[in-house]
Image: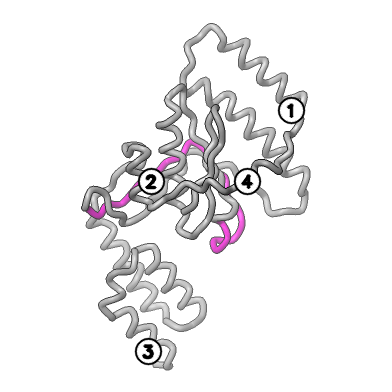
């Protein structure tokens, strides 16, 4: 076995390897495989170990956690110094969006507000934002809006117990290579009036998916905030 493969094999078998998270283990061995430091047998073995280990932990939905629990579990902290929004210029609403919002208001004004009716507005906003972004950069990589796509993250420590967090965000938008996707991600969660619950879910969903240092932007009616992770 070449020296590089022997070194990687030794690292995989070391006690310190057991402390590495499941996701990081898989990322490391895939990178080593692409760099030809390990063979397909070792890649398959690690993938099977990760799959087996992930089944040993209880799965918890991120929507069941409070905002404080999300912040603690994902080790987040508030960034009070971020000023990016100060330099963002408002975008004039396209006439087609104004007309669509008027139709929604006319059709739903006599009914109680629900998450379903809130999604009408979000759908209109996202579709028009997608059209604007795509038209401004016609030759860029296509942006895809995904709805209720499930994924998992972990294990993480919740109340002194290791668990796997599961997520199914209402809307998820991300693009680019896996190495830089944390810079280009947007999660939208539809909520009626329970803003804190929506913030906890959106923050948790983004924190679950992202594993690199970055800034997450969370929006709700009062004002935006940014969070370092």
CB atoms of marks 4 and 1 within 8 Å: no
- Residue ID for mark 2: 71
Quick one: label 3 or label 4, which is nearer the N terminus? 3
- The mark lying in front, picked from 2 and 1, is 2
191 relative to 61 in the view: left or right: right
Label 3: how many Cα within 10 Å (few below 14, some 14–19, many 20+): few
Q: Which residues are magenta?
A: 161-181
Report crowding for label 4: few under 14, some 14 to 19, many 20 or more residues within 10 A (C-alpha).
Answer: few
Quadrant the N terminus occupies:
bottom left
Q: Badge 4 is on which residue?
A: 83
Q: Which mark is residue 93?
A: 1
Please tell me in which quadrant of the rendered image residue 108 appears.
Answer: top right
Kindly report the distance in space between the C-alpha atoms of the residues bearing marks 3 and 4: 48 Å
Image side of residue 12 versus residue 135, left or right = left
- The residues bearing labels 2 and 4 have C-alpha atoms spaced at a distance of 21 Å
- Give the mark toward the camera: 3 or 1: 1
């Amino acid at each position: 076995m070449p020296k590089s493969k022997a070194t990687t094999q030794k690292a995989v078998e070391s006690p310190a390897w057991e402390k590495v998270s499941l996701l990081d283990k898989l990322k490391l061995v895939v990178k080593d495989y692409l760099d030809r430091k390990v063979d397909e047998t070792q890649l398959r073995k690690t993938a099977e170990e990760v799959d087996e280990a992930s089944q040993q932990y209880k799965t918890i939905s991120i929507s069941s956690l409070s905002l404080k629990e999300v912040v603690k579990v994902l080790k987040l902290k508030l960034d009070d110094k971020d000023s990016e929004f100060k330099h963002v210029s408002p975008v004039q609403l396209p006439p087609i969006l104004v007309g669509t919002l008027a139709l929604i208001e006319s059709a739903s004004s006599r009914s109680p507000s629900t998450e379903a009716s809130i999604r009408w507005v979000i759908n209109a906003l996202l579709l028009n934002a997608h059209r604007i972004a795509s038209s401004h950069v016609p030759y860029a990589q296509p942006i895809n809006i995904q709805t209720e796509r499930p994924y998992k993250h972990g294990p993480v420590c919740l109340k002194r117990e290791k668990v796997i967090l599961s997520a199914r965000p209402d809307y998820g938008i991300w693009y680019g290579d896996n190495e830089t996707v944390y810079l280009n991600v947007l999660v939208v969660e539809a909520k009626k009036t329970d803003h804190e619950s929506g913030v906890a879910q959106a923050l948790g969903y983004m924190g679950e998916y992202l594993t690199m240092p970055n800034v997450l932007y969370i929006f709700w009616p009062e004002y935006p905030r940014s969070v370092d992770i």
